Image: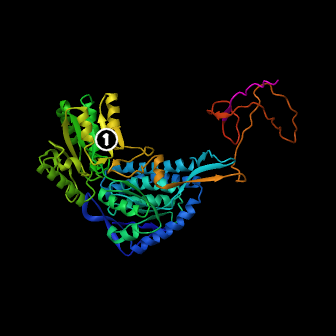
Amino acid sequence: MRTVETLLGGQWEASGEWIDVHDPADLRAPAFRVPALRPEDVTRAYDAAEAGALLWRRTSPLERSVVLGRAAGLLRERVEEIAADIATENGKTRAEARGESLKAADFLEYYGLLVGRGGYGTLLHDVRPDTRTSAHQEPLGVVLAITPWNDPLITPARKLAPALAAGNAAVLKPATETPVSGLHLARALDDAGLPAGVLNVITGRTAEISEALLGDPRIAAVTFTGGNAVGDRLRERFAVRNIRFQGELGGKNASVVLSDADLPKAARTVAAASFGQAGQRCTATSRVIVQRDVYLEFTKLLLDEVAALRTGPGLADGTTMGPLSGARQRDAVLAAVAGAVEQGATVIAGAEGAGQELPEHGCFVRPTVLADVTPAMDIWHDEVFGPVLALRAVDSFDEAVDAVNDSAFGLAAAVFTRDLGAAHRFADRAECGQIAVNLTTPGWDVHHPFGGFRDSGSPFKEQGADAGCGVMRRGAESGGRGWPAWPTVRARCPRPARRRRTRRSCRRPRRRRRIRGCSRPTRRSSTSPSCSGAAGSLRWWRPAPDRRR
């Protein structure tokens, strides 16, 4: 068992009490232990974050970008070590854990460049004479990030990267089941030069520290990923305090297979979307809606793909699907399957039936496919969050779209078709935040806005440029005559026509004459003739002729 300290106020600290972290592939002995912080430790974390926020907001965005870039590089250098720990505490395969580590680095790099090299704000017209107005974004202060166990590194990176790039300080509460991955992220940021107090990580038992964690008056914004029951309580709690809340909640994502689809590709893609990470992704496909005339053929192809999966410990060679994250999650998934069978569904692959023998002492569930599912069954509507896929046949495109929208959630959906018109109609009518065509429901890149409709989340999106809306506020300022001048760079235009020769002095540089009639500059490519200078590479239009000559 390895001891891992947590980051508070720029110091790596232990505690008198510890929380054991287990490998879900073998629950017999703990793999790690982390500090079990107390409420007074949480208050110290907010003290440090308050001081860190004042320092970090005054740090140049370019300097912040450098720190985030260094941290991204460290995550990439340490990818094998980090991936092994993710697979150990979460159960992912080594390949999945490695991909998560690299994608977390991409988030840090992207937001560092987006904010550090992006615009400062916007100049606006003003009806008042001699007045100049600007709108700009500024950090909120202290951001609380509460992250889940299913993506224990990439979700903290997705939330912390825009918050830190914008100049906020952060308090991170990783899931108690998987805290080590988030601590790897904190270690990379600390080693990269993040000032003390800007990031603090709370490891502890939620029931013991929740009031100190959620009730601190210095919280300016909260970003949360998790279940709807907890998310709804948090939303209500912070709404009365006028604290900005961004939530990424549940999903019951559907893939539609139309009769003209490439069926082998659809089967491969659906299997990957459903059983990757053992189905423990908010964007995992859990419902498949197939046009009736290809239902049997598609089902056979899908079962062949499922039969090829190999369930086992995440770090074992040949494993393509690891265990679930814990015994409680395993038992909940098996109970959902049993409930579906009681309501009339048929298990055609997986669950507790015949198949590959599963390792002992772990939280394993076979990849499961259910047929004869109807809209009246709980399995059609409830999020299972495991390797369980429900199949349903429909007769038409319209019925397929209605089946997709037959859900309280609206996170992700996919359609498989060769008809571009059908793909566009599906995207227009499916009530989901993320739409894929001939692709998996998961797989959105760092620069893609991400989030769902309905009960799947809040108005604030994650990822892409939109993520800043949850962690920044917008302000405006105006100034009239006497307002300090804006720093302005002007480049002079060389005379393009016959230039008048001027005498040159060996002691003084030649001064260019102002040219009348010069029109405005425009951006140019690096291969075009240029007038270089402080304004950057520009191309100048040929001046208009002087009609007075």
Residue 361 percent across, percent down from the top left: 21, 60
Magenta-drawn segment: 538-549
Looking at numbered disc 1 in the image, what kind of residue is underneath it? Ala
Question: Which residue is identified by label 1?
Answer: 413
Does the magenta-highlighted stretch encompass residue 440?
Answer: no
Horizontally, is 271 left or right of 154 in the view?
left
**Residue at 54% over, 67% down:** 51
Could one spot residue 238 in this view of the protein?
A: yes
Callout count:
1
Instruction: Residue 509: name its quadrant.
Output: top right
Q: Position of residue 3 (x, y in %)?
A: 37, 67
The residue nearer to you, when weighing 455 against 525, is 455
- The residue carrying pointer 1 sits among few (fewer than 14), some (14 to 19) or many (20 or more) residues within 10 Å by Cα, namely many
Can residue 35 be seen in the rendering of this structure?
Answer: no
Q: Residue at x 33, y 53 (%)?
A: 249
Q: Main secondary structure of the magenta part?
A: loop
Q: Is residue 166 left or right of residue 342?
A: right
Pick the residue in front: 202 or 260: 260
In depth, the one of 11 and 357 nearer the eye is 11
Name the colouring of the figure: rainbow
Q: In percent of the image, x 27 and y 35: which residue is there?
A: 266
> Which image quarter is the N terminus in?
bottom left
The vertical placement of 304 against 545, above or below, is below
Q: Nearer the viewer, residue 525 or 355?
A: 525
Callout 1 secondary element:
strand
Residue 3 relative to residue 374: left or right: right
Q: Position of residue 108 (x, y in %)?
A: 48, 51
Instruction: Quadrant for the C terminus, please.
Output: top right
Residue 372, given in percent of the width and then of the height, sits at: 14, 42
